[in-house]
Image: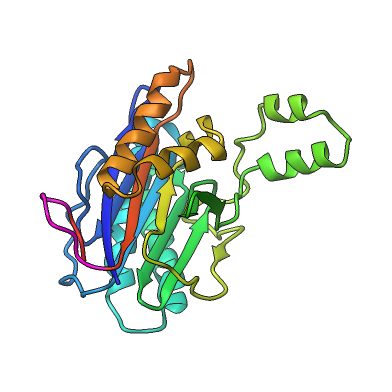
Amino acid sequence: MYFEIAIRASRGARRAQEDTAVSWPLADGRDAPYIGASMPAAMSGRIAAVLCDGMGGHIGGAVASQTACEAFLPHLLATAKPVRARLIAALEHANATISERVAETPSLSGMGCTLVAAEADANGLAWVSVGDSLLFLWRQGAIVQLNADHSLAPEIDKLAESGKISWAAAQADPRRHYLRSALTGDEIEMIDLSDQTAPLLAGDVVMLASDGIHTLESSVIADVISDCAHVSAATIAERLISTINAIERAHQDNTTIAAIRVLASVPVQTGRTHV
């Protein structure tokens, strides 16, 4: 089993880009803020990626997301322990590094970020996440969200499902994007960790995304991926970003996408990153 990955990002209507994403092997694309941390050489048939969305002002948010990514990925790849143990250890290390950064620079107090990270190999896909950045699996035209959303959106939607409020009121509720958990250097309130590795098939697409992706309905995301899943990871990420940008939403959030294609064999290369 082989993998191909690409990262693309858009600032949207925000003043600054507070998302950071990085992968190993290094992704095709430099549109997202890029971390060149020291990491071990790539292992055949193994891929890992982490994406963080900052909070705490455009300076603090950018620092938090970059700090977390820079701390997380090398720590994840540093040992040969079971993947779930490494994911938790890397998450805790990233959170502790944010705490250390705030202690060094008190003006950054209050900064934090979401985090979603995944590692895949021939055994399948494993992940950890905190906050509302998302992990999707597309397979044969259908898409599912794999991780939990730690914003208030799922709780508000439950009120609509029970008939206590209308769906229109639920979608318009300004609290939808309030986070119930984030990396801030303090105790992490909620963590989503995969129970076991999820099997992957050739042709699958795994996607990590910051919450700017919510501009698109899941059916639209699935259709976009279906149109270009056979082309490249870069094309998938680029098409999704361009589809979001074309909507021209007045308050469009930063959007970053890390798209991973699962391949049966190494494709003919045109500069794309694969392992």
In the picture, measured across the screen, residue 59 lies left or right of residue 109, that is left
In the picture, measured across the screen, residue 53 lies left or right of residue 47, that is right
Residue 173: percent from left, percent from top: 70, 27
Give, as a single range, the part of the protein colored magenta: 265-272
* Displayed quadrant of residue 155: top right
Residue 204: percent from left, percent from top: 41, 59
133 shown above or below 18: below
Residue 30: percent from left, percent from top: 19, 42
Q: Main SS of the magenta segment?
A: loop
Q: Is 126 colored magenta in this rendering?
A: no
Q: How many marks?
A: 0
Q: Nearer the viewer, residue 138 or 245?
A: 138
Tell me what residue is drawn at x 81 percent, y 36 percent. Answer: 160
From where the camera sits, is residue 135 visible?
yes
Q: How is the image coloured?
A: rainbow
Residue 90: percent from left, percent from top: 39, 68
From where the camera sits, is residue 107 visible?
no
Q: Nearer the viewer, residue 270 or 130?
A: 270
211 shown above or below 44: above
190 shown above or below 126: above
Where is the C terminus found, in terms of image quarters?
bottom left
Tell me what residue is drawn at x 41 percent, y 67 percent. Answer: 201
Tell me what residue is drawn at x 20 percent, y 48 percent. Answer: 28
Q: Nearer the viewer, residue 81 or 44?
A: 44
Q: Is 269 colored magenta in this rendering?
A: yes
Where is the N terminus found, in terms of image quarters?
bottom left
